[in-house]
Amino acid sequence: MSLSRRDFVNRSTAIGAGVLIAGSAEVLATAPGAVAAPSGGEAPAAESAEAARCATGYGELLPDPDGILALPRGFKYQVITYTGKTKLVTGESTPSNHDGTAAFDGPRGGTVLVNNHEIRGPRTNFPHPVPLLDGHVYDPGAGGGCTVVEVRKNGKEVREWVGIAGTSTNCAGGATPWGTWLTGEETEDKAGQNGMTKDHGYIFEVDPHDQDANRDPQPIKALGRYAHEAVVVDQKRGHLYLTEDASNPNGLLFRWTPPAGFKHGKGKLRKLAADAGKLEAFKVFDSHGTFVDDLSRVTKVGSTYGVDWVNVPDRDAKTVSVRKQFAAGEVTRSRKLEGMWWGDGGFYFVSSFARTESPVQHDGQVWFYEPNRRTITLKVLLGVNTDVAGDHGNFDGPDNITVSPYGGLVIAEDGEGVQHLFGTTEDGRTYPIARNDLNIGTAEKPEFSEFTGVTFSEDGHTLFANIQEPGIMLAITGPWWRLRHRSGHGYND
C-alpha cells in the first residue's frame, strides 16, 4: 500500500516521535552547517571507540607475517585469485581492480563467485584488463567486466573464466533471487569518449553457472543510464532498487517498478524494452512533512523518515544526466551512495562519506529501507575520522556491504589511510574484522588499497573479500559463531 507524505505525517502525529516514526526536526539539520556530525568513532559516542571494540567483535587484529591480511586470533585466510599471479582457464592473468562480488552455491559443496573488475576508460591503459572473450564482449574499447571464480569445497582448486567483457568501471552490483549477478557500470561515458565505442552507464546480467547464457551481452536499458553502484531485488514486489555514486550534484537512490504482468527470471530483464516499467528517484521527508534535500543532514542514529518516489523524465540520459534532470526540492540527494544488500525484510544502503559538497560532513552512513512502510532509518553514523593513519577503531568510508548470518553487517572500508573490513552490531556499534597490511606505496608514504566485494558463502562458513589493488580475492574462515556470544555485556567463550 502506498504511503503518501500526508499519511506519514498523520501517522507520526498519532503515535508520536517513537521508534516507528522519528525524524523530528530535533535531529535534522535544516540549514547548512546547523548541526555537525560527531567527530571520531561512530555516532553513539557515549563510549570510546576502544571500549566499544573491546565489548564486541572477535578481538585484536594480529599482524600478518606475509604482509597481506591481519585477522583476529583463530581466523585464517586463503588467496583465491591474485592479479599477475593467478590465471584464467584461457591463460591470461586474473584481471585487476577487483570490486563487487557475490557468492553462489557451486557443485559438490563448492562456491561460485562473480567478481567485478572496476577498470575505467580505455583498456589499453591497463596491463590486466578483462580479456575480450569471443561472443562475450559489449564494447571492445572497454577494459572492465566480470570474471566467474569456481572454488572447490577444499579451497585448493580454483577455476576462473570470463563472464562478460567490454564493459566499463564495473563497481558494485547485486545478486538476484534467481541466481544471477547484476553488474553496474559506474560511468556515464558515451561512444567516442575515453576510448569507448558504445554508450556506457548500464546494468548487465551475468549467469555464474552457464557461460553460454552470457553470450551477446546486452545492457538493461530499462534500469537507466547513470553512474551505477549497487542493486537489490525485492522478490515479493518485483521492484529493483539502485544506488548512484556521483556528485555535482550528489547522486540518487532509484526504484524500478516492472511493467504489469512481468515475471522475473534468468535473462528476462535483458529482453525488456528500453522504456519498460517505471524508474523513479527517492524524495525524503520528516514526521512534520519537511522535505530533506540531502541525507547528510540526518545526525542521529534511529531517525526514521518517509519516502516518496518521483518519476525520472529521461532514464537513458540522452542529453542531461539523470540526476541533473530534477530541480531543487524535487528529490533527495546523498554523497557516494554505494553498497546495498537485501536482508531483514528490506535493504541496507550506504552513503560512504560527505564533505563540502554536502550540507553536513560525516565519514559514513548506513540506512535501512522498509518497503512495507516506505521508510528509511539511519542505522549507523560514522563521525569524521581524525585518525586515518591509526588503527584505533575509528572507521571511515563504508562501501560494499553485506548482511552477516551471525547478526549485524559486514562492511568493506574505502576510506583514508588504514583500510579495514569491519562489522556493525544491531545497535550501531562497530568492530574490526580484518586489516589490509599490503602496502602498495612506500615505507615513507604507505598506501593501502580499499576492501571490496564482501560476501559470505551460502553456508556462512567463509567470508570472501577483495583487496582492489593489485587485485586479490581472499577467503576468510574462522570461529564466526563466536560473535553470537559477544555482546555489550562482554565475552562468553
Image (cartoon, grey):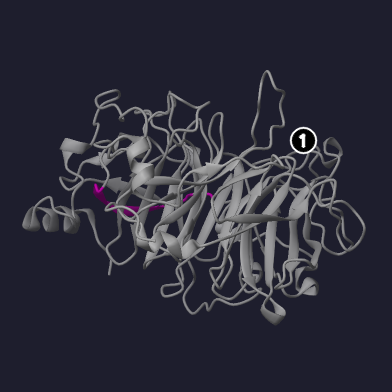
- Measured as percent of width and height from the top left, residue 375 is found at 29, 56
Looking at the image, is 491 positioned above or below residue 143? below
Does residue 219 appear left or right of residue 285 in this picture?
right
Q: Quadrant of the C terminus?
A: bottom left
Looking at the image, is 170 positioned above or below residue 29? below
Residue furthest front in the image: 493
- Measured as percent of width and height from the top left, residue 174 is found at 57, 60
**Quarter occupied by residue 237:** bottom left
**Of residues 145 and 107, the one drawn nearer to the viewer in this rendering:** 107
Residue 331 in sight here: no
* Residue 53 within the magenta-colored segment of the rendering: no
- Measured as percent of width and height from the top left, residue 166 is found at 79, 52
Q: Residue at x 49, y 80 (%)?
A: 261
Q: Residue at x 43, y 31 (%)?
A: 354
Q: Residue at x 12, y 56 (%)?
A: 10
- Measured as percent of width and height from the top left, residue 188 is found at 64, 41
The amino acid on which the numbered mark 1 sits, given as a three-letter code, is Asn
Residue picked out by circle 1 = 194
**Dot 1 surroundings within 10 Å: few (below 14), some, or many (20 or more)?**
some
Does residue 378 appear left or right of residue 277 in this picture?
left
Query: What range is drawn magenta here?
Result: 302-314
Magenta-drawn stretch, dominant element (helix, strand or loop) = strand
**Quarter occupied by residue 296:** top left
